[in-house]
Image (cartoon, rainbow, N blue to C red):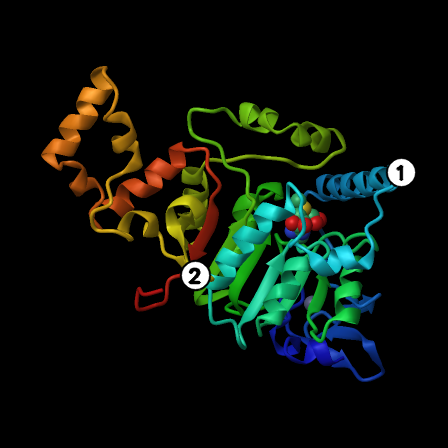
Amino acid sequence: MEELDAWLGLLQCPDCQSGLEADAGSAERLSCRGCGRIFERSRGIWNLLPSVISNVEGKDAEKEGWQQKSEEDKRTGWTPPPEFYLALPYVEHHYYTPAARYLDIVLEYGKPWLGKKVLELGAAECWATRHFAEAGSDAVGLDYDDDKDRMGKAQILLDHLPIHFLRVKGDGECVPFKANTFDCIFCVSVIHHFFDLPRAAMEISRTLKPGGVLFAIHEAFHPPYWTEERALAWNEENSINLEVGINERSYTAGFYRKLFRKAGLKLDVITPRWDVRHEGSSLIVKPGAGIFANRHYVPEMLNSRSERKDLVGWIARLLLASQVWRIAVSPLVFPLIRFQLLNWMQRPKIIVARKPTPSGGG
Ligand SMILES: C[S@@+](CC[C@H](N)C(=O)[O-])C[C@H]1O[C@@H](n2cnc3c(N)ncnc32)[C@H](O)[C@@H]1O
Ligand SMILES: [Zn+2]
């Protein structure tokens, strides 16, 4: 029961919110101190789903959709060997290759990890949970889908690597942990799948410690001048997913910011292009790092346009000559316009939503 030791006092009953206790008779059972409900572990995964699940038809349809896709993969001969799961996300793949870069950025930005409590929501095979555990944190992977081809695959990591983490079958809209438990909540392509997004945001906020941070990578964003339909149609994988019942949605960065603000979190985004620099083998992650790295940095946007012979070129040259652009890139003004620029730009973004500390710091 070793992986449970760090967590037992922090778990709560998803039905009545009371604490849970170990069962004297079985290491595979926990019981609720309030309502007496028994929770069991099967194939290493604790089932902590609430008795009444909101939007249960939709959630089950999505789970079946993922299963249908894995069956389809198997039929086409795609049955990844254990080495594949052990290598994730550092493999050549349209989904995992960028995920690896975003994960590296989060691991760098959120340092140090030793002894931190980390929850991966929608962890599926727990490939990311594993990297937080390896970085020294007490990690837990939670997913609605505990299928043998999803969270079941995490057993490969636990069998082959000198790490342990807790696995929970649960609902991100009713997280079975006490308030103020986690230093970090991490998600990969999960937030935009929730049916009740405000409720999930409230749960994230409730279970984060003051000063704790949600990082979400591979979320679906679209600029305000696009409709959600257009955004979803942009990637053909979405229509396949929607057909099999997977809840694909897309939102603007401004929408995510309002959503999390209502839940009590302060949202910013990191974009690899502007906010991350390489120095030798180290990553420097700092919102605006690309702009502030060099005090004499002239925005590419102006430089490249200043060559043009038309009105745009004339305006660019005027802005450059008058030095007006320096106001826009100053440390005081830039963060204010940076978020709006990113909201309107279709470029990858990492959500960073922080729960303020009572003193107002982060
Ligand atoms: C696109 S998959 C991403 C899986 C994994 N993070 C990855 O990147 O490989 C979305 C995951 O979120 C999980 N999920 C969706 N809604 C959930 C909910 N309400 N509670 C817990 N997990 C949920 C799904 O079961 C699925 O595993
Ligand atoms: Zn209970």
| Residue wearing tag 1 | 75
Compared to residue 177, the image places residue 336 above or below, namely above
Q: Secondary structure at mark 1?
A: helix
Assign the C terminus to one quadrant of the image. Answer: bottom left
**Residue 338 appears in view:** yes
CA neighbours of label 2 inside 10 A, class few (<14), some (14 to 19), many (20+) = few
- Residue at 42% in and 49% down: 270
Quadrant location of residue 163?
Answer: bottom right
Q: Position of residue 290 (x, y in %)?
A: 33, 48
In the image, 122 versus 282, the foreground residue is 282
Quadrant location of residue 358?
Answer: bottom left
- Residue at 78% in and 59% down: 83
Residue type of the residue flagged with mark 1 = Arg
CA neighbours of label 1 inside 10 A, class few (<14), some (14 to 19), many (20+) = few
Assign the N terminus to one quadrant of the image. Answer: bottom right
Residue type of the residue flagged with mark 2 = Gly
| Residue wearing tag 2 | 280
Q: Secondary structure at mark 2?
A: loop
Quadrant location of residue 136?
Answer: bottom right
In the image, 139 versus 304, the foreground residue is 304
Give the side of residue 209 with respect to residue 86, left or right: left
Query: Earlier along the polypeptide chain: callout 2 or callout 1?
Result: 1
Give the side of residue 329 with respect to residue 150, left or right: left
Q: How far apart, in angstroms, are the residues tagged by discs 2 and 1?
A: 44 Å
Give the side of residue 57 with respect to residue 112, left or right: right
Q: Position of residue 125 (x, y in %)?
A: 73, 56
- Ligand 2: image quarter: bottom right
